[in-house]
Image (spheres, rainbow, N blue to C red):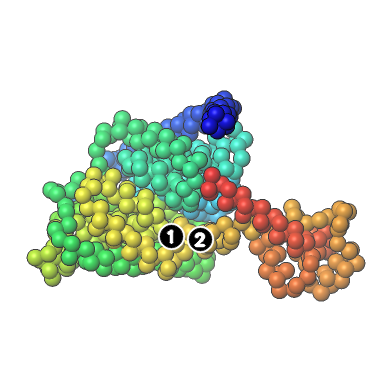
Amino acid sequence: MLSQFDRHWRETRAACAEGWDLLRHKGPGQITFWMIALVVGAASGFAALLFRLAIERLQAALYGTEDVSTLATFASGLPWIWVLLVPALGGGVVGLILHKFTPDGRVRSVADVIEGAALCDGRVEKKAGLASALCSWITLSTGGSTGREGPVVHIAAMISSWASNLLRVDGITGRDLLGCAVAAAVSSSFNAPIAGALFGLEVVLRHFALHAFAPIVVASAAGTVINRLAFGDVTEFVLPGQTTVEFYLELPAFFLMGLVCGLVAVLMMRAIFWSDDLGTTIQRRLSLPHWLRPAVTGLMLGAIAILFPHIIGVGYETTSRALTGTLGLGEAMLFAVVKVAAVSVTMAGRMGGGVFSPSLMVGALTGLAFGHVATAIVPDHSSAFTLYALAGMGAVAAAVLGAPISTTLIVFELTGDWQTGLAVMISVSMSTAVASRLVHRSFFLTQLERRNVHLAAGPQAYLLAMFRVQGVMRPVTAEGAADEEACLRMMDQGLYLNAQSTLETALPLFEKSGVAYLPVITRTEPDGTPVLQGALFHVDALKAYNRALAATAEEEHS
């Protein structure tokens, strides 16, 4: 008995000593990182707040009102020529900025932040990002039919990139800081601390690693405090009365509505991509300069806004009307179709802004329309049709973002209504299940797929693109290098790799040819003569890929 007690006592002392050592050597470092996360979160929160206030100021100068909740009503009383020309002038300025400061004339947004997290150690472009923020500010202030969450997420990503470069942190820490910045920006923009934290994990980092959770929550809380200091503890939307599910027999209706909302979300995303392709085709055939494309888009938006002023800006007034049930069935359906068209035109025209706020509006209108029909068919077992608008708002937005968890929570935090969780969760789960099978999981990941950036399939797909052949090959002078004569023979047969190629190109070629190694070449200027640099061995490529997969798994489960 005494020996057993001694053994337990020694184990307890050893555990305490190990814990004390961990606290001394790693505790302060962790606390320091949390302080950095707090600073990055506060900076991102202030950036989101300033961006919102800047939109309101410029909007007030152009349309005469700062209040986004009355913009559509106010714009309907303005002269038609003003409603037509303001978006066109805004588009012209956007086009000139993008032409001068971006290499491809494209506004940076959430998709670029996701790409930065996965492929660039948590860093994003800064010069093009600043130009994009300016363009998004002008777009949203002059009538562009998009949302402000995309720009603030990228602005926050630039802040975290600056901090990561200043501190010279590695990829894991850089991604954690990126998640902190994004969470703070979202929570500050929407007064949604829980959803902000989960958005950073679910959408940007795309994992729920435990080591990232605490600093991201700290940053998200900082962003929320900044929002509440400026606007108070108020929700973006106010619902009338109490919204509850009257009877459990009504739940299948929300199941069905979720499927409908998933299809609407897919139609919305495909309309945006189809419009973008159509705009590119028209621009190429007419030989229009890149800077003119947003100006033409602004003119088209102005023409739509003359008849439908609700498409101007983020659309909070129409969303509120849908949630309070002041729109009829015909109005809800018509406004949803026109809003999808306006969003497609705005984004196809390469103007700024995000898709979250438009998806909230389209979802609320879709849910309201469905609610009108459902409550008319089964009036005895139906709750208020405004509940369908609330659930539809979450369902379409979740399908577009590919983020069911954070979107469900952000709907609750935007409305302050936590009593309808069952209906919202059913609708969200069904819509995301449908949409994720018809697109590449989300709007952002589909955007990246269209640029040949394959993140939707997970690390096993995109990690191959991170390794250049030149960094993995064995040079001709290295020990264990490939036989030079054999390499030259393979080159004559057209079996070789360029030094700037990636393992994404190399591994399929190994599978197809069945060889143990492939020659790696560069080409001389100006005649393009191939010069042998070394050889990439199949086993070296597989080892590099395996190490990357192991490191990714370790990060995601730490």
Q: What residue occupies the far front of the structure in this picture?
A: 1
Which residue occupies 83% across, 58% down?
Answer: 534
Q: What separation in Å lies between label 1 and label 2 (alpha carbons)?
A: 8 Å
Which mark identifies residue 121?
none
According to the picture, the residue beneath numbered tag 2 turns out to be 456
According to the picture, the residue beneath numbered tag 1 turns out to be 442
Q: Quadrant of residue 342?
A: bottom left
- Quadrant where the image shows the C terminus: top right
Which x, y percent locates residue 505?
68, 65
Which x, y percent locates residue 422?
25, 56
Whether residue 85 appears in this view of the structure is no
Q: What residue occupies the far left of the structure in this picture?
A: 380
Which x, y percent locates residue 409?
32, 48
Q: Quadrant of residue 104?
A: bottom right
Mark 1 is on which residue type? Ser
Give the mark nearest the N terminus, 1 or 2. 1
Q: Closest to the observer: 98 or 557?
A: 557
Which residue occupies 29% across, 57% down?
Answer: 425
10 Å neighbourhood of mark 1: few (<14), some, or many (≥20)? many
Mark 2 residue element = loop
Which x, y percent locates residue 227?
33, 35
10 Å neighbourhood of mark 2: few (<14), some, or many (≥20)? some
Q: Closest to the observer: 371 or 201?
A: 201
Q: Closest to the observer: 272 or 356?
A: 356
Mark 2 is on which residue type? Ala
Which residue occupies 15% across, 61% down?
Answer: 247
Q: Compared with residue 470, is residue 164 higher up or lower down, i.e. above or below?
A: above
Left or right: where 409 falls relative to 200: left
Contact? badges 1 and 2 (CB < 8 Å): yes
Left or right: where 117 falls relative to 267: right
Q: Compared with residue 256, is residue 65 higher up or lower down, i.e. above or below?
A: above
